[in-house]
Amino acid sequence: MKIDRLLEIIIYLLNHDHVPASYLAERFHVSVRTIQRDMVSISSIGIPVYADAGKNGGYSILPNYKIKNTDIRDEEQQLVIKALKSLATSYTSDTLNSLIEKYNAIIEKEGGQKVFWDFSVTKENQQVQDMNAMLEQAIARKNYISFDYRNADGDHFHPTVQPLAIHYKWYAWYLFAYEEARQDYRTFKVARMDRLVIENQHYEQEHGNIEERMKESEQAYYKTCIHIEVQFDKNETGLIKEYFPDCSIEKIDDRICRIYIDVPAKERLWKALLLSFGSRVKVIGPDDYREELIATAQNFLSNYDI
């Protein structure tokens, strides 16, 4: 839509000087002539756009023209833009990039950025990013979707669901959806999805506040978690606090401490984390989880001649 393009052009010019018409035409997928008409439209609403001729010429907005935001303090503005830029390192989205452009136009950059966050290590592969883009489209249009899915046990099935939201947690992207066949809300790990198809059929069912539905589903999921007792030498307290900051540490005697953690029953990453401590920790109970952990370690060692 033209109004959207005009807004994007204004925002881009607020952040850049001497932008050639040819570049704007390529960026917004229109002709140079259309960009020239857009500049006339922008000027007509009172925004001071001017053009410079020559090799380094292009369109600019007068330097003293600035979008102001007096409701948010400077340190708060800096925090928001840092968070947005950090999110961009782990999530590919044209909408997010556009939002960063808009917020850069609002804040005053004085003194330079002193804190840098980089979550690129959490960025999933291109397949997940492409899947997220398709899921966003299906959610916006309320299309049914179907896909091949492999769960944590390696079982395969092919659900058809109503996609409601995608969200990031536990260092991975997840789809929150409603499955009519089960009449229940479900969460799917996007990395385990394949052959995603956006169906032509639309769903009309209303689900109210999606965030509330997600919280209810998550609370139901946590009820299935296993309550584990872990003991460790008090000299390892610093390391335990680093990995389990929300768990209370109890002192058993002068040498041994313990914590209780709740872990998903079938989540392998928790087993890997516990095994990574080696002899530094000891899982006390419940017995079935401890035996399962021992079996996992033995299966790993069976691959080696030791």
Image (tube, rainbow, N blue to C red):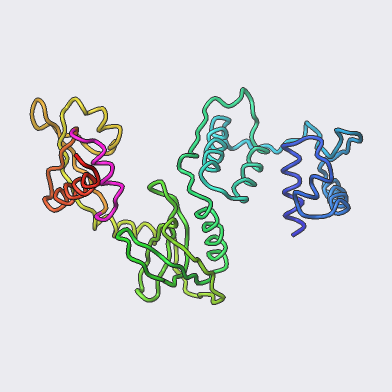
Q: Position of residue 103 (x, y in %)?
A: 63, 40
In this view, the residue farthest toward the top is 111
**Residue shown at 55% from the left, 43% from the top:** 88
- The image quarter in which residue 113 lies: top right
Q: Position of residue 261 (x, y in %)?
A: 22, 44
**Residue shown at 50% from the left, 72% from the top:** 144
Magenta segment: 265-279
- The stretch drawn in magenta includes residue 272: yes
> Is 77 situated above or below 182?
above
Q: Nearer the viewer, residue 129 or 279?
A: 279
Q: 12 left or right of 194? A: right
- The image quarter in which residue 16 lies: top right
- The image quarter in which residue 19 lies: top right
**Residue shown at 52% from the left, 57% from the top:** 132
**Residue shown at 29% from the left, 52% from the top:** 267
- Quadrant placement of the N terminus: bottom right
> Is 302 situated above or below 203?
above
- Quadrant placement of the C terminus: top left
Q: Nearer the viewer, residue 165 or 64?
A: 165
Q: Position of residue 105 (x, y in %)?
A: 68, 38
